[in-house]
């Protein structure tokens, strides 16, 4: 008879197996922004709707996402529990133990932004004191689902058209979907090249929300 410990390890192995897909990890990042339809998630990931649905069903069986029907659409949201903490731990482990991950982080992300990012705790203190502009560079639909209080939404692709709305006499803190979201890295690099004082938030909106900090939802 299989021991209780081995049975638990078998279940842990099954849960870990669900995360063994780059597409499913990416889907978790997108679902963490807010509730999305299968069609929108397929558009974001570049997968077919059928393939996206299959990945989401596996994530749902593992408890990583939850779903509901809205007419003919199926909407997915992040599941309960410390899912983002689990993914963050995987990030940290990979950066420490995978030479390829360290190389990508250093050669690609590091070249775009070599300054230390702003921690959530530090940003919270700066917001209380005032004197910082929050810049959300995610697409508008993600911003509308939820964002940091008082944040200005300028999607990365529209940055050039809205430079006049950004102050040069005040520090800007940019954020997007998470620690590896390229949007905020590219926004920071572009704004620094134009003389703005700007830094990144250490992670993104989902981690801010998961930490229990206040968020706003657009009407």
Image (spheres, rainbow, N blue to C red):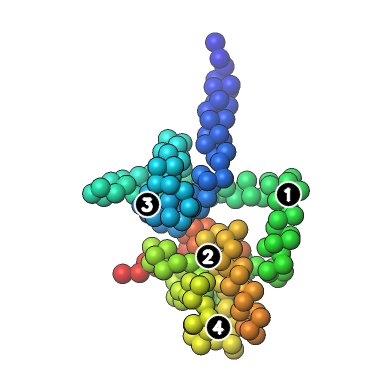
Badge 1 vs badge 3, beta-carbon distance below 8 Å: no
C-alpha gap between disc 1 and disc 3: 32 Å
C-alpha gap between disc 2 and disc 1: 24 Å
Q: Nearer the viewer, mark 1 or mark 4?
A: 1
Q: Is residue 194 above or below residue 147?
A: below
Badge 4 vs badge 3, beta-carbon distance below 8 Å: no
Query: Relative to the observer, which residue lies in front, 23 or 169?
Result: 23
Q: Name the residue under label 4.
A: 131
Query: Relative to the observer, which residue lies in front, 104 or 82?
Result: 104
Q: Mark 2 points at which residue?
A: 176
Label 2: state its secondary structure: strand
Left or right: 36, with 97 as reference point: left
Residue in view at x 29 percent, y 49 percent: 73
Instruction: Tell me the crowding category of disc 2: few under 14, some 14 to 19, or many 20 or more residues within 10 angstroms, Cα based.
Output: many
One can see residue 99 in this view: yes
Q: Mark 1 points at which residue?
A: 100
Q: Nearer the viewer, mark 1 or mark 3?
A: 3
Lower sequence index among marks 1 and 4: 1
Label 1: state its secondary structure: helix
Residue in view at x 49 percent, y 58 percent: 206
Q: Is residue 136 above or below residue 104?
A: below
C-alpha gap between disc 4 and disc 2: 20 Å
Residue in view at x 58 percent, y 27 percent: 9
One can see residue 12 in this view: no
Residue 184 is drawn in which quadrant? bottom right
Lower sequence index among marks 2 and 3: 3
Instruction: Tell me the crowding category of disc 1: few under 14, some 14 to 19, or many 20 or more residues within 10 angstroms, Cα based.
Output: few
Q: Mark 3 points at which residue?
A: 39
Instruction: Tell me the crowding category of disc 4: few under 14, some 14 to 19, or many 20 or more residues within 10 angstroms, Cα based.
Output: few
């Amino acid at each position: 008879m299989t021991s209780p410990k081995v049975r638990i390890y078998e279940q842990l192995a099954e849960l870990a197996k669900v995360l063994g897909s780059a597409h499913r990890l990416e889907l978790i990042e997108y679902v963490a922004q807010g509730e999305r339809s299968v069609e929108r998630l397929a558009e974001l990931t570049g997968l077919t709707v059928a393939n996206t649905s299959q990945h989401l069903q596996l994530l749902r069986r593992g408890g990583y996402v939850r779903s509901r029907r809205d007419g003919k659409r199926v909407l997915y949201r992040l599941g309960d529990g410390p899912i983002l903490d689990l993914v963050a731990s995987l990030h940290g482990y990979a950066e420490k133990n995978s030479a390829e991950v360290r190389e990508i982080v250093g050669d690609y992300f590091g070249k775009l932004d070599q300054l230390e990012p702003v921690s959530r705790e530090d940003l919270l203190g700066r917001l209380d004191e005032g004197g910082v502009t929050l810049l959300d560079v995610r697409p508008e639909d993600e911003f509308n689902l939820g964002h940091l209080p008082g944040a200005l939404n300028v999607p990365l692709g529209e940055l050039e058209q809205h430079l006049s709305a950004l102050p040069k006499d005040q520090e800007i803190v940019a954020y997007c979907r998470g620690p590896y979201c390229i949007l905020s890295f590219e926004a920071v690099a572009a704004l620094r090249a134009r003389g703005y004082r700007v830094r990144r938030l250490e992670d993104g909106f989902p981690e801010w929300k998961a930490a229990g900090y206040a968020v706003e939802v657009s009407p």
